[in-house]
Image (cartoon, grey):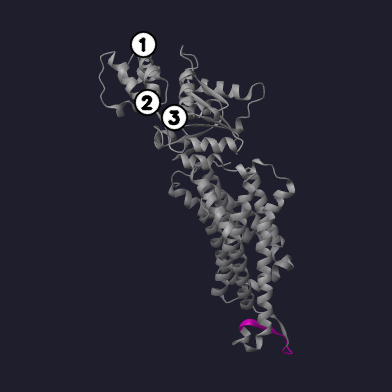
Amino acid sequence: MKNYLLFDLDGTLTDPKEGICTCVQYALASFGIEEPDLDKLEPFIGPPLKDSFMEFYGMSEEQAEQAVEKYRERFREKGIFENKLYQGIPGMLQTLKARGLTLAVASSKPKVFVEQILEHFKIAQYFKVIMGSELDGTRGTKEEVVRAALRELFGNKPIERDKVYMIGDRRFDVEGAHAVRVESVGVTYGYGSMEELKAAKSDYIVRSVEELEHFLLRGADEAVKKTTAQRIWQIARPFLMFYLVKNALQGLVSFLLVLLGGYLPGESFWFVRDGEGVLSGFTGNGYAIISALGFIGGAAAVFHPARRAIEERKLDSRLLHLKKEPGRCYVLLGMAAVGASLGLNILFDFFGLTDGSETYQQVAAQQYGAWLPLGLLCYGVIAPIAEELVFRGLLYHELRRFLKMPSAMVISAALFAMYHGNAVQGLYAFAIGMLMVYAYEYFGDFKFPLGIHIGANVLVYLLSATEIAAGIMNLPACFVCLVWAVGGVYFLNKEKAIF
């Protein structure tokens, strides 16, 4: 969450089209230039006036200065009030200030006019600093205005650049922000287009005042510092709910199956008995059904908070994923997921890690002893959906409230590994957990980690429960698969670095 918000004025807080464009008309008319269409003068909204007269009408520097004076001649009397606030701006400013954020204005318009406009609309009280250019031409660029605003905001203290957003509608706002090394938020409800803001490499882009308010308030609940114990509980609570409900339901179903065992048809489908006919356990089919019901119950217990967290993250991610990634990125992700799943399983098997883990062998005997379609349904589909709701849907979301992505990624993957309860599955889960978080952040959609989890589980189950893996259990195949995995992530990162 950013604590310091610098707002542009024209096209961000107010819609100044009528005032600015009619004053430009007035200035052009003094040079014998008639421009009846106000829409054609919209490019004057945002950048410094002198530069615009020179760029759009080929004026010399001296002529442009004269045009600015003529512009101000009308602006002082009429143009300054031919203006209106964008709907929702006063409420947003009030909310932001009430949440403890520090607001400022950094406009290319002369400071004296900025102050008059803010007072006119009764929103000046929300801003700690109001900064603009000077009538004599000093502070004429957006970079100079933003620098001056930051100096006034922070005074003698070091400028906390990582806690500042510059918010504006034109490329000049983005460029000014980047010049002083703060992040930019572009708004498309003003006079800059989506294409202009993308070309300027705005860090974020929003489409409405409502979306801007939501974006700026992300993580505002964390403004009240939580203790370490509170944060741990916030992370642990959904997992404990899932784990307890899942295990309790599995225990209950196991008890009922044993109790009703004599009445169930096809006893051999469910139970294993010893040589004396005493029930000694469940078959792979029985374990699969018990597990599936437990996963469904656990998922149901966390479904509503997980859905809210996923929707919240989706809304946030939309600001970072303005268009679909190129098709090759999806191919690269597929390469990475398949390569990691196959390569790690071959590696563990080839070096005897799977045979050396008694706990893993017990788990494998239960899971791969099921009828193939039933095993695929339980362990390839139901289990991944339930686990993703918890680990990427809830736990990762909570970690991201107060940690940067790399730290949240490692911790969530480590928790996913420990959940599996044995070294073999734990190592595999850690690596795949990292990849799933990477995909979540890269594509901004919960479907991607979910798809990787389901795809990897189905693939591994098919390889382990059938004989089709026999031909690839060798080091060359392992090497190729791991190269695929590393190469997929490497080239994805070349397309777009997210760290």
Which numbered tag is attached to residue 66? 1
Kind of residue at disc 1: Gln
Tag 1 secondary structure: helix
Of labels 1 and 3, the one closer to you: 1
Residue 142 visible somewhere in the drawing = yes
Q: Depth check: 404 or 377 in front?
A: 404
Disc number for residue 211: none
Report the quarter where the C terminus lies. Answer: top right
Q: Which residues are magenta?
A: 269-277
Q: Residue at x 65, y 55 (%)?
A: 430
Q: Is residue 248 above or below residue 257?
A: above
Q: Would you name the residue on which mark 3 appears? A: 171
Q: Is residue 486 left or right of residue 46?
A: right
Q: Position of residue 17 (x, y in %)?
A: 36, 28
Give the CA separation, mark 2 to mark 3.
Answer: 24 Å
Q: Nearer the viewer, residue 31 or 338?
A: 31
Residue occupied by mark 2: 82
**Residue at 55%, 42% in the rendered image:** 498
Three-letter amino acid code at the position of disc 3:
Arg
Q: Earlier in the sequence, mark 2 or mark 1?
A: 1
* Residue 260 on image: x %, y %: 65, 85
How far apart, in angstroms, are the residues tagged by discs 2 and 1?
A: 22 Å
Amino acid carrying label 2: it is Glu
Rendering coords of residue 399 (x, y %):
64, 48
Is 270 contained in the magenta span?
Answer: yes
